[in-house]
Amino acid sequence: MTGEFERRHGFPPGTNEVRPPDHDDHAAARTLAQVSLISADLVTFYDSIGDVTWEDVGNGYFIEPASDVLLRLQEYGSVDVGADQKAHGLVIGSNGGGLAYVAGPSGAVYRTRTASLDDPELDKVADDLRQFLELLERSLTRFVADGEPGYL
């Protein structure tokens, strides 16, 4: 993607990487693993991936490091994801256009309809983290092929 980026867009690419975890990421992931809001898949993800930063795919796609997820949880609390307001999720990333991705305790991933997390309206985008990551991969593949990331 980055090899042809500057020729296609007229400016050099930003950061586009899947970063492996470091010591601090592992420590934050261990702390997050003790929170009942986090799915087993997300624990496994953070054991292998530090974060995902794709600044140049559309508006960008970001899966935040476990330390940022933990800090947001400590500062702002969880996000209501259930219709009955009894299920709570964690903000794990964003699409670079102001919309956040929230992982529910069941593993489902939601996207906010607006940039506000105060009283968010959420759309389910994936049944689990694996499906969400596959959708991200498709967005990257489409962007490389035709410059359009789709809408995730």
Image (cartoon, helix red, strand yellow):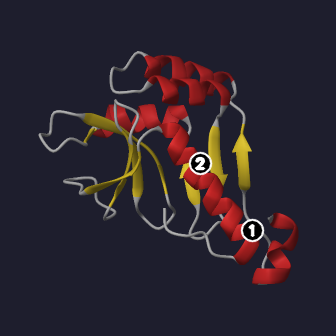
Residue 64 seen by the camera: no
Where residue 111 sits: x, y (%)?
37, 55
Q: Nearer the viewer, mark 2 or mark 1?
A: 2
Residue 6 seen by the camera: yes
- Sequence-first disc among 2 and 1: 2
The amino acid pointed to by label 2 is Glu
Question: In this picture, is 33 found above or below 4?
Answer: above
State the residue at coordinates (72%, 56%): 16
Question: In this picture, is 132 found above or below 3?
Answer: above
- Relative horizontal placement of residue 27, taking residue 100 as reference (left or right): right
SS at mark 2 in the image? helix
Where residue 96 sits: x, y (%)?
51, 63
Q: CA distance from mark 2 to mark 1?
A: 15 Å
Q: As rendered, which of 77 and 41 lies closer to the eye?
A: 41
Residue at the farthest left position: 84
SS at mark 1 in the image? helix
Which quarter of the image is occupied by the N terminus?
bottom right
Residue 125's disc number: none
Q: How many marks?
A: 2
Per the image, the residue denoted by label 2 is: 134
Q: Are marks 2 and 1 in contact (CB under 8 Å)?
A: no
Quadrant for residue 65, please give it: top right
Question: In this picture, is 135 found above or below 139?
Answer: above
Where residue 57 sits: x, y (%)?
64, 66
Where residue 47 sits: x, y (%)?
62, 24
Per the image, the residue denoted by label 1 is: 144
State the residue at coordinates (45%, 19%): 33
State the residue at coordinates (85%, 73%): 4
